[in-house]
């Protein structure tokens, strides 16, 4: 079964609906990721190792299997300075996301990661020469206020790791900025192949995690958690979310991705008992409202 079959069978003359469908399925697959991370009970370094290594290998296999033409030319696109930057950005966000989740509440980290469209807007000023105007800067300020609200009450979350809430939020913001840098570079240099770049970046983070793992800690997790994260959740969700903008707008994909911030903490709450405080929920609501308004305003009402 391939993409053309799905389009012809279920989405005839509705390619945008197909793109929306891919984005939705990709994000829904991604939402239990942090819950499975908690179930693994792995230390941060072996967890990083397995996630990065298996995601990288699976993405490369996925890309090779569905890439039928000009494979050598497309893979060579990442052997350039823009390609190296994208690889490095994916490696960094893979590292910092794992460190953040192991440091503090899932709600804190996912709220910080949800600011990715704002970092992308900021970077586009310098890399794409795009003007944000007063509305864009106001959005960034209000969203960061929401993140500060979540972080300020982060220690009152029930069942969270006994780490630093501030450090966890910083890791989340670095993850958001890394993703924003990668996708902004791909926008600027359209010849870059994002999936093999993400795969290599993930592999690098996995190797880094394994190298820092203490002896006897790598093989202590339930096998199903490792395989679920590295072979199913991460590569499949990333693949679908990467393909979706071919058929729909990137703004729609960004809006759909905000579902992870809503559903991800819910899974952890139900399954693990990690419950955010009311103040944290209100702060997260402010962030998601401001970012949604920003995307809708800039992509649907300010389009020339």
Image (tube, grey):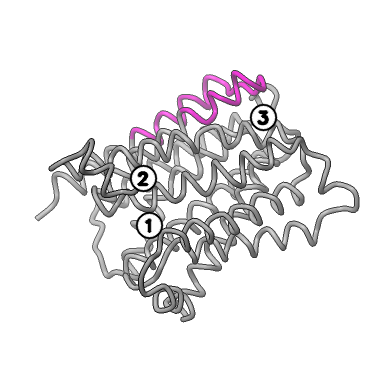
Which badge, 1 or 3, is on the more N-terminal residue? 1
For disc 2, the marked residue is 1
Q: Considering depth in this image, is 240 or 68 the residue closer to the camera?
A: 68
Find residue 18 and report its horizontal and vertical position in percent: 25, 41
The relative height of residue 139 versus residue 304 in the rendered view (above or below) is above
Label 1 sits on a secondary structure element that is: helix
| Residue at the (59%, 46%) spot, across then down | 231
Query: Where residue 155 is drawn, which disc sits there?
Result: 3
Query: Would you identify the image quadrant in which residue 287 lies?
Result: top left
| Badge number at residue 37 | none
| Residue 152 on image: x %, y % | 58, 34
Relative placement, left or right, of 188 versus 84 is: left
- Looking at marks 1 and 2 on the same chain, the residue that comes earlier in the sequence is marked by 2
Q: Secondary structure at mark 2?
A: loop
Graded by Cα atoms within 10 Å as few (under 14), some (14 to 19) or many (20 or more), the crowding at tag 1 reads many
Residue range highlighted in magenta: 263-289
Q: Can you name the residue that lies furthest to the front here?
A: 1
Q: Is residue 175 above or below residue 152?
A: below
- Of residue 222 and residue 64, the one placed in the foreground of this image is 64
Identify the main secondary structure in magenta: helix
Q: Quadrant of residue 159?
A: top right
Q: Is residue 280 magenta?
A: yes
| Picture layout, residue 143 above or below residue 77 | above
Query: In the rendered view, does 200 fall on the left or right side of 247?
Result: right
**Residue in the image at 77% along x and 58% along y:** 210
**Where residue 142 appears, x then y in whole percent?**
38, 41
Residue that sits furthest to the left in the current view: 304
**Which is in the foreground here, disc 2 or disc 3?**
2
Q: Residue at x 46, y 30 (%)?
A: 283
> What is the C-alpha distance between the residues marked 1 and 2?
34 Å
According to the picture, the residue beneath numbered tag 1 turns out to be 120
């Amino acid at each position: 079964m391939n993409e053309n079959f799905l389009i012809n069978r279920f989405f005839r003359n509705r390619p945008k609906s197909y793109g929306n469908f891919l984005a939705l399925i990709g994000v829904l697959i991604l939402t239990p990721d942090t819950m499975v991370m908690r179930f693994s009970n792995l230390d941060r370094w072996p967890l990083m190792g397995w996630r990065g290594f298996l995601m990288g290998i699976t993405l490369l296999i996925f890309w090779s299997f569905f890439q039928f033409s000009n494979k050598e030319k497309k893979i060579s696109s990442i052997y350039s300075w823009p390609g190296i930057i994208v690889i490095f950005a994916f490696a960094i966000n893979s590292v910092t996301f794992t460190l953040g989740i192991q440091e503090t509440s899932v709600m804190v980290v996912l709220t910080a990661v949800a600011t990715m469209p704002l970092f992308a807007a900021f970077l586009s000023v310098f890399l794409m020469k795009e003007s944000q105007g007063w509305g864009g800067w106001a959005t960034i300020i209000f969203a960061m206020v929401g993140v500060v609200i979540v972080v300020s009450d982060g220690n009152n979350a029930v069942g969270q790791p006994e780490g630093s809430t501030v450090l966890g939020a910083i890791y989340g913001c670095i993850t958001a900025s890394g993703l924003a840098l990668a996708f902004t570079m791909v926008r600027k240099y359209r010849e870059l192949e994002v999936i093999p770049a993400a795969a290599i970046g993930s592999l690098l983070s996995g190797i880094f995690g394994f190298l820092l793992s203490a002896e006897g800690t790598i093989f202590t997790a339930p096998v199903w958690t490792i395989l679920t994260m590295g072979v199913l959740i991460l590569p499949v969700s990333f693949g679908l979310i990467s393909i979706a903008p071919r058929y729909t707008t990137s703004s729609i994909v960004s809006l759909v991705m905000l579902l992870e911030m809503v559903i991800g903490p819910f899974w952890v709450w139900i399954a693990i008992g990690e419950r955010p405080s009311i103040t944290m929920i209100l702060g997260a609501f402010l962030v998601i409202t401001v970012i949604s308004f920003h995307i809708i305003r800039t992509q649907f009402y300010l389009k020339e």
